Image: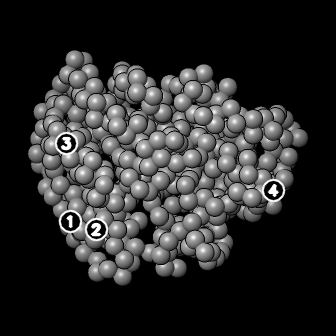
Amino acid sequence: MAQHTWRNWAGTHSSTPHRFETPRSVAELSTLVAKATEQGLHVKPVGAGHSFTGVAVTDGVLVSLDNIAGIESVRNTPEGPVATVLAGTRLRSLNDQLWDRGLAMINLGDIDVQSIAGALSTGTHGTGARFGGLATVIRGLQIVLADGSVVDCSDSENPDLYQAAKIGLGAIGIISKLDLAVQPAFTLRAVESPARLDETLEGLEQDLANVDHFEFYWFPHTNRVLTKRNTRLPGDSPLQRVSRVRGFIDDELLSNTVFDGVNRVSAAFPSVIPQINQISARALSAREFTDRSYRVFASPRRVRFREMEYAVPQETVKDTLREISAWLDRSDCRIAFPVEVRFAPADDLWLSTATGRDSAYIAVHQYYRRDHREYFDAVEAIARAVDGRPHWGKMHGRTAADLRPTYARFDDFCAVRDKYDPSRVFDNDYLRQVLA
């Protein structure tokens, strides 16, 4: 496949690598990395290509880990079960394999097409005031370094490499295996209902305290939101799934087919978007169902879009949303995509967007046929004013110079990178932008 062009899912980045490799084992991966280094070629791993940034772009060797996939083993520890998972395993497949073993991921995001290593390396998260991002469940890593050596790391073995590589952006090496804390399989009772934005913000503290996984979608140019409250239940709880007809109407027809049509119309006639959002928000109906946890966490996303997401201190989320709404009122910008708002507790991962503080995530989207720049630039400025941190896998304009002050361990990360990849085998334009 040499000289074939690779593109990410969103169509925001592409590259024509010197060659494309699909190793079938960690040994093959080790050999090809060592060979590329000897040849003076850059190397980048790629999973599903679902990052909106150029984190996987390279002019050297692009390495797909799709053939290095599956659950290698599960062991019991005093703290609970730990699964050893190969890096190329797609989340959707991982969830099924864990469930067959009576297990589940502790928390998940709302998309399940990514590879587990790619999702963790860019700081993917779900929602829940007590449940951290995906990388917080890492208990050990195996990583292939620039010279081809395969190194294990954990809290007790190569600890600095371990801390840096948990959310490593592919800058230090290629993760080949991960030890992940998992838990006995559980179900989720989902309650979805329309509400008003002002009422939702007023009751936010209560929802965060009492709901396991709370999030909401705000329709720009309106005071309307869709709230989602997911409650954790034992794995043997009776399932009450959405009927096939209701699921097709809600998740396929309205959320994908009709929504794509609405965006095509709004791309041609942006002035109608506020009216469309009012109609769409008022047309929403409440629903309640219980299903396997991973089926509730993730939803199909077939409408192509651009996305930017900022983690802001949790106590600033209300004012930040009000500022975004006020900017939309002042501007001529019309936005059809809902704004997604999620939550996570503070953690201690070096490059986690939630490091050191409880965080709220504000994700903004634009249909791929429309220009996103004015909207994203405005939201980025509003988020930066409260020391917001951009998601590493989503669009933003930040650089190392202005990212360094918001991450206490930024220089520690860079020092580990200097130690393990001094020749910058794993470098690319995006890493030069955010790490310098």
Task: Give the residue type that dot 2 points to.
Answer: Arg
- Please tell me whether residue 305 is drawn above or below residue 137 in the rendered image: above
The residue pinned by badge 1 equals 288
Alpha-carbon distance for marks 3 and 4?
Answer: 51 Å
Circle 3 residues within 10 Å: few <14, some 14–19, many ≥20: few
- Give the mark nearest the N terminus, 2 or 4: 4
Helix, strand or loop at mark 3: helix
Mark 1 lies on a secondary structure that is strand
Counting residues from the start of the chain, the first of labels 3 and 4 encountered is 4
Classify residue 239 by image quadrant: bottom left
Whether residue 181 is situated above or below residue 215 in the rendered picture: below
User: Label for residue 189?
Assistant: 2
**In what element is the residue under mark 2?**
strand
The residue that mark 4 highlights is: 150
What distance separates the C-alpha of mark 1 from that of mark 3?
23 Å
Task: Determine which of the numbered discs, if any, sits on residue 202 in the image.
Answer: 3
- Secondary element at image label 4: strand
How much space separates mark 2 and mark 1, taking CA atoms?
7 Å
**Residue 434 in picture, x, y percent from top left:** 61, 29
From the viewer's perspective, is the residue at label 2 or at label 4 nearer? 2
- Residue 115 lies in quadrant: bottom right
Question: What residue is drawn where x is 61% and y is 42%?
Answer: 350
